[in-house]
Amino acid sequence: MSSTPPGSSGSPGSPGSFISSGAAGSAGSSSFGRSPDSVVVALRAAGCVFAEDEARLILSAARDTEELAAMVARRSSGLPLEHVLGWAEFSGLRITVEPGVFVPRRRTEFLVAEALAQTPDASVVVDLCCGSGAVGAALAAVLTGVELHAADIDAAAVRCARRNVAAYGGRAHEGDLFDALPADLRGRVGILAANVPYVPTGEVGLLPPEARDHEPLVALDGGGDGLDVLRRVAAGAGDWLAPAGCLLVETSERQAPSAIEAFEAVGLVTRLAVSEELYAHVVVGVRR
């Protein structure tokens, strides 16, 4: 299971730091008062790797002892910490994350940084496969006066993204990839960020319970080799990108060569960006 602190990225589909849901239930009916030690003990007994950090966040969020007990019980049952809190930290922002919505991973902050470095003057941004809309919000927080659109096939994700992009004048759309976007965006997109699902179908069952039990399968399962959605995005990107606009997609080290081939096959000038610190791999393709 993931051994990363709260808010960090684990595997392509691991939102938190939970060893096993087998110990869950020990905290469900306990009365904690406001004692940090009692919360830490309950979380540690349930298998939370970073119990002290999580206890601090839960204690700061709970409005009373009843809510505190309920939050600890939900976390102890295996619910991702971000779903318990109702938010995730991402690129310095507090992103609303509702139950059933994909939790933004810390490693994806590298995709945001690469997008800003590649196209620092982008005036139109699209966050495709947006989940909570964290990537789009993070980009819009830096780019002045940007036109922001987020899109996802999952209705719950779109509702959540709508809340997160509203502060930047952004719009959220429901639909299958480019079908969700307004037609007048064709040929105008400066940054097309697509945090596509890239876990191979056969490996979804190996993900931590927090991901496979509490996040939508459509946000995790990338098909046989994990690259089905990536290839579809690459194939359609050229119609939407502005001249010198860029497409950025996160992938794994193992999948990166095939992802690069998919970008190059459609004529994008392609490079691979790697962050050793975040163990992040982002394929960047620029329209000629």
Image (cartoon, rainbow, N blue to C red):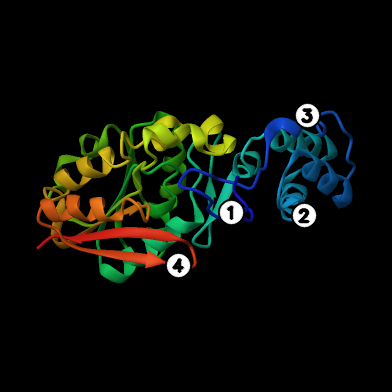
Q: Residue at x 56, y 39 (%)?
A: 208
* Residue type (three-letter) at the residue carrying disc 4: Glu
Q: Looking at the rendering, in which quadrant would you find the N terminus?
A: top right
The location of residue 32, given as percent across then percent down, is 88, 40
The location of residue 138, given as percent across then percent down, is 42, 58
Q: Which residue was labeled with disc 1?
A: 7
Disc 4 is placed on an element classified as loop
* Residue type (three-letter) at the residue carrying disc 1: Gly
Instruction: Pick the residue in front: 5 or 92.
Output: 5
Instruction: Pick the residue in front: 74 or 142.
Output: 74
| Among numbered discs 4 and 3, the one appearing first in the sequence | 3
**Circle 4 or circle 2, nearest the eye:** 4
Q: Residues within 10 Å of mark 4 (few under 14, many from 20)?
A: few
**Residues at marks 3 and 1 touching, judged by CB atoms closer than 8 Å:** no
**Residues at marks 4 and 1 touching, judged by CB atoms closer than 8 Å:** no
Q: CA distance from mark 4 to mark 2?
A: 27 Å
Q: Residue at x 60, y 39 (%)?
A: 83
| Among numbered discs 4 and 1, the one appearing first in the sequence | 1
Q: Quadrant of residue 197?
A: top left
**Circle 4 or circle 3, nearest the eye:** 4
Q: Is residue 144 visible?
A: no
Which numbered dot is residue 52?
Answer: 2
Q: Looking at the rendering, in which quadrant would you find the C terminus?
A: bottom left
* Residue type (three-letter) at the residue carrying disc 2: Glu
**Residues at marks 3 and 2 touching, judged by CB atoms closer than 8 Å:** no
The location of residue 67, given as percent across then percent down, is 77, 36
Q: Which residue was labeled with disc 3?
A: 25
